[in-house]
Amino acid sequence: MNPDPLDALFRTVREDAPDTSRAEFGFETRVLARIRAERRSSWQGWAWRLCPFFTALAVAAGAWFYGHRDGLPETENFYDAVRLAGTPVVSFYLTGEP
């Protein structure tokens, strides 16, 4: 009877198993510490936490501009000013006079 060579290789590997106890010591603690450190220093984490604030700010700004749109120049003047390099629009916003 000829033993299977694959079984012989597996047996050899099992007998020559390295000692990994030193690498296993505190593995979970090190991984969790690294995850916590990366989570604190990530700018994406800060951006995700500030997202509701910026959304509320954008909604408030939109509501304020919607409520105060009566101070804008007429549509015809605005388009003419944009076509002519915008100088009248700047003077309108700075002085309030067309």
Image: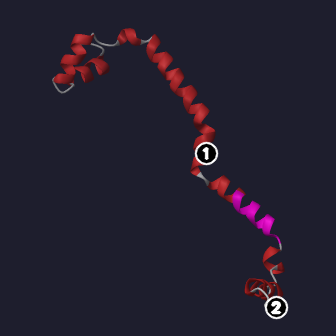
Q: Which mark is residue 46?
A: 1
Query: Disc 1 on helix, strand or loop?
Result: helix
Residue pushed farthest front?
Answer: 1
Question: Image check: 24 left or right of 88?
Answer: right
Q: Quadrant of residue 76?
A: top left
Location of residue 91 (image quadrant): top left
Q: Which mark is residue 1?
A: 2
Specify start and end residues of the magenta stretch as a single range. 26-35
Residue for point 78% across, 77% down: 23
* Residue 27 is one of the magenta-drawn residues: yes
Task: Tell me which corner region of the image, top left, top right, bottom left or bottom right, holds residue 6.
Answer: bottom right
Residue drawn 40% across and 12% down? 69
- The three-letter amino acid code for the residue at tag 2 is Met
Rate crowding at label 2 as few (under 14), some (14 to 19) or many (20 or more) other CA atoms within 10 Å: few
- State the image coordinates of residue 80 (x, y, percent, origin top left): 18, 17
Q: Is residue 98 left or right of residue 15?
A: left
Relative height, residue 25 to residue 44 (above, below): below
Q: Position of residue 22 (x, y in %)?
A: 81, 80
Q: Considering the numbered disc 2 on the image, is that residue within a helix, a strand or a loop?
A: loop
- In this figure, what is the number of numbered marks? 2
Which of 6/70 is in front? Answer: 6
Between discs 1 and 2, the one toward the N terminus:
2
Prevailing secondary structure class for the magenta stretch in the rendered image:
helix
